[in-house]
Amino acid sequence: MIDLYTSATPNGWKASITLEELAVPYTVRPIALMKGEQKLPDFLKINPNGRIPAIVDRDEGDFAVFESGALMIYLAEKYGRLLPSDRKGRSTVIQWLMFQMGGVGPMQGQANVFFRYAPEKIPYAIDRYQTETKRLYKVLDARLADHEFLAGDYSIADIANWSWVSIHFWAGVEIGDLPHLQRWIEAIRARPAVQRGIVVPEPIDFGISREELEKMAKSMLVTRPAAA
């Protein structure tokens, strides 16, 4: 049995979607970030860095895994899915996983902060992080021009990148000129396991009205023109 310590964030989604895709039993242990529960001593024993998500594998002597990318690799290897076993295939998936860990996540995260939350609007910072986030999106779009998924078959690399890119609107980054990225977002969002995973432990609260949330959700999909 896996215990999942998580909150409603893109990094949290990476873990919950992976578990849903693997169809393994797990218990959700919600962490209230605004209450600082991620800094409590009991949780720091699981993740010394005080961040979510983290898991504890009860079947392996209460083995704890923190860092979302490491967690995804651990689960994929344990259950034999979402990560190829051959050296080249495995490396390709991990490359695109690290692309999210080292690029998309940090850059889009900073874009979120300066665009949405900073008490002082700093145009340079907003432009810097939105521009870099868009550049990374273009890299993904180019890759997806001739690949259905990022690394061959659907994998943890897709889950990791999708969990961030699917809420591009929250960082104020438009993707209307990136058709391959749009196609990929739509395809992954339609997966039942993804739809289950993004409401664990609860839907993300963007602090806006239901009407605005529905509008944002629709913006994550692509409306394709009817065939002539």
Image (cartoon, rainbow, N blue to C red):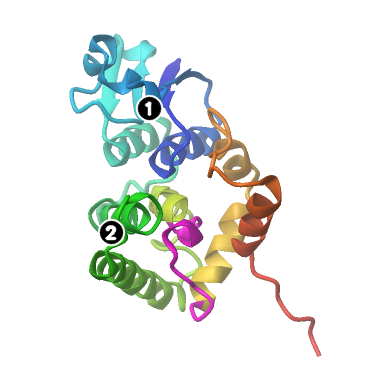
Closer to the camera in the image, 142 or 94:
142
**Which element type, helix, strand or loop, lies under badge 2?**
helix
Task: Residue at 39%, 78% (x, y): give it.
Answer: 142
| Chain-order first, disc 1 or disc 2 | 1
Image position, residue 201 (x, y; %): 53, 27
Residue 139 appears in which quarter of the rendering? Answer: bottom left
Whole-percent x, y for residue 116 in the image: 40, 54
Secondary structure of the residue carrying tag 1 is helix
**Extreme bottom residue here?**
228
Q: What residue appears at the point 74 percent right and 81 percent down from the top-left corner?
A: 225
Judged left or right of residue 206, residue 215 is right
Q: Is residue 131 above or below residue 149?
A: below
Q: Residue furthest left?
A: 48
Percent position of residue 76, x then y: 39, 37
Answer with left or right where residue 140 lies relative to residue 192.
left
Q: Residues within 10 Å of mark 2 (few under 14, many from 20)?
A: many
Prevailing secondary structure of the magenta residues: loop
x and y, in percent, of residue 173 in the image: 43, 68
Residue at the disc numbered 2 = 107
Residue pointed to by mark 1? 33
User: What's the amino acid at mark 2?
Assistant: Met
The residue positioned 31% from the left and 22% from the top of the image is: 38
Instruction: Tell me: 167 left or right of 97.
Output: right
Structural crowding at the residue carrying mark 1, measured as other residues with C-alpha within 10 Å and reported as few (<14), some (14–19) or many (≥20): some
Q: Amino acid at mark 1?
A: Leu
Taking the spot 71% from the left edge, 51% from the top edge, the residue there is 211
Front-most of 141 and 58? 141
Q: Which residues are magenta?
A: 165-178
Quarter of the image with the C terminus is bottom right
